[in-house]
């Protein structure tokens, strides 16, 4: 048996590593990962990561990781209302709401929204004013507009049935690549590769414990290799629940992601002004610009700018000298 193995490293050079090199044990993981500062590698049943951080997990490593996540989920799964249904429309609503909004804030809003708009048809045929009014508190009100437009497309082009394929889902207003895959996974139990903040947290925590600026391109191969193709819905629930727990107990590893961006301050931001305008216009009759200046504690030019943005997006309208949401 040879005593060393050669592996390609940066710029095509090679490096010999002894088979009896020590193995670094990650106490958070349920399996061992051999480690080197510049080259992460494996032999036997472990993993190899080259300098480009391309990770190939062995079957033993994959199974060990899956066992750890499933064991956690069995003991600590979250009881979320959108997990108690297989209605694709309800799951679509939840996925749109969960874009850029934390779970705890979404739960009561999701329940109220589904109670008021229980079917695609009810959402498609109501007024935008009612939709936006029900949406209040979630922020990013463009999502409410897009969600109603999606309901209209589904109702009149898909006979009220949410399409099951990613390509068709991506044609719906406000549905991007991630949301399309999430709907296909959670509504139709299709095995797609998903990455969002909690999933990203899990893989950085477990596989990149000493790294910073970890790119999603380094994580995606791991997600692909460890995906439970027979039970993708429950597998991603488990990953998300573990990721949520890790954030609370381990200084949020997702901050070491290359894609991490701290959200700008809400107070006195344009987002706050837009939100106040939407709230004001859903709780009052049509209002003139001078009246809005009196009701909003912000500079008139910023109010005008936000009004124009909202009008351009189709959230509000101006009729004569008054602004309203229809």
Image (spheres, helix red, strand yellow):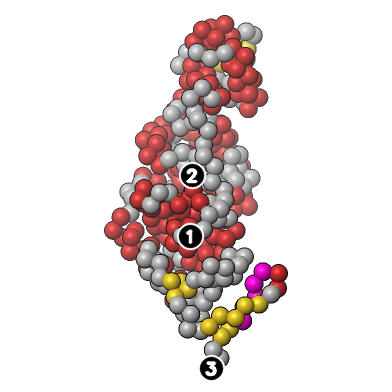
C-alpha gap between disc 2 and disc 1: 32 Å
Packing grade of label 3 (10 A; few <14, some 14-19, many >=20) is few
- In magenta, the rendered stretch is 6-10
Q: Is residue 7 magenta?
A: yes
Q: What residue is at 64 percent from the left and 72 percent from the top?
A: 9
| Camera-side mark, 2 or 1 | 1
Query: Residue 71 location in percent, x, y?
Result: 33, 64
Mark drawn on residue 210:
1
Residue 211: say if magenta. Answer: no
Of mark 1 and mark 3, the one earlier in the sequence is: 3
Residue 229 in the image: above or below residue 113 = below
The front one of 103 and 203 is: 203
Which residue sits at x=60%, y=45%? Answer: 176
Q: Please say if the residues under marks 2 and 1 sit with CB atoms less than 8 Å apart.
A: no
Q: Could you give the CA–CA distance between mark 1 and mark 3, rounded to whole angstroms?
A: 33 Å
Q: Quadrant of residue 292?
A: top right
Residue bearing the label numbered 2: 95
Between discs 2 and 1, the one toward the N terminus: 2
Local crowd size for mark 1, using a 10 Å CA cut-off: few (<14), some (14–19), many (≥20): few
Q: Relative to 188, say whether 150 is above or below.
A: above
> Circle 2 sits in a helix, a strand or a loop, which is it?
helix
Along the viewing direction, whichever of 241 and 41 lies nearer the viewer: 41
* Residue 310 visible to the viewer: yes
Q: Is residue 278 left or right of residue 14?
A: left
Q: Which mark is residue 1?
A: 3
Query: Measuring 40% from the left and 67% from the top, which residue is drawn there?
Result: 26
Secondary structure character of the magenta stretch overall: strand
What percent of the width, then of the height, locates residue 257?
53, 51
**Quadrant of res 242:** bottom left
Give left or right: position of 284 versus 170.
Answer: left
């Amino acid at each position: 048996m040879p005593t060393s193995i050669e592996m390609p490293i940066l710029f095509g050079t090679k490096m010999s590593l002894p088979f009896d090199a020590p193995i670094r044990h990650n106490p958070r993981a349920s399996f061992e990962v051999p480690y080197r500062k510049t080259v992460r590698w494996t032999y036997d049943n472990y993993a190899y990561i080259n300098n480009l951080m391309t990770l190939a997990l062995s079957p033993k490593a994959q199974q060990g990781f899956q066992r750890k996540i499933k064991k956690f989920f069995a003991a600590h799964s979250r009881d979320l209302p959108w997990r108690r249904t297989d209605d694709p429309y309800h799951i679509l609503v939840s996925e749109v709401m969960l874009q850029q909004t934390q779970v705890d804030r979404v739960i009561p809003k999701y329940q109220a929204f589904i109670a008021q708009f229980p079917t695609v048809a009810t959402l498609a045929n109501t007024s935008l004013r009612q939709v936006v009014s029900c949406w209040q508190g979630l922020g990013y009100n463009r999502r409410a507009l897009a969600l109603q437009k999606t309901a209209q497309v589904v109702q009149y082009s898909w006979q009220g049935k949410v399409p099951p394929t990613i390509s068709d889902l991506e044609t719906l207003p406000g549905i991007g690549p991630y949301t399309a895959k999430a709907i296909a996974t959670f509504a139709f139990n299709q095995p797609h590769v998903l990455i969002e903040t909690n999933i990203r947290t899990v893989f950085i925590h477990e596989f990149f414990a000493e790294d910073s600026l970890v790119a999603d391109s380094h994580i995606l191969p791991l997600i692909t290799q460890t995906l439970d193709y027979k039970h993708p819905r429950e597998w991603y629930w488990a990953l998300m629940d573990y990721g949520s727990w890790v954030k609370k107990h381990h200084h949020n590893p997702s901050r070491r992601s290359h894609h991490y961006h701290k959200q700008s301050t809400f107070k006195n931001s344009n987002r706050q002004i837009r939100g106040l305008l939407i709230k004001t216009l859903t709780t009052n009759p049509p209002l003139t610009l001078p009246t809005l200046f009196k009701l909003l504690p912000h500079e008139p030019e910023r109010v005008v700018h936000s009004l124009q943005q909202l009008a351009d997006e189709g959230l509000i309208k101006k009729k004569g000298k008054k602004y309203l949401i229809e």
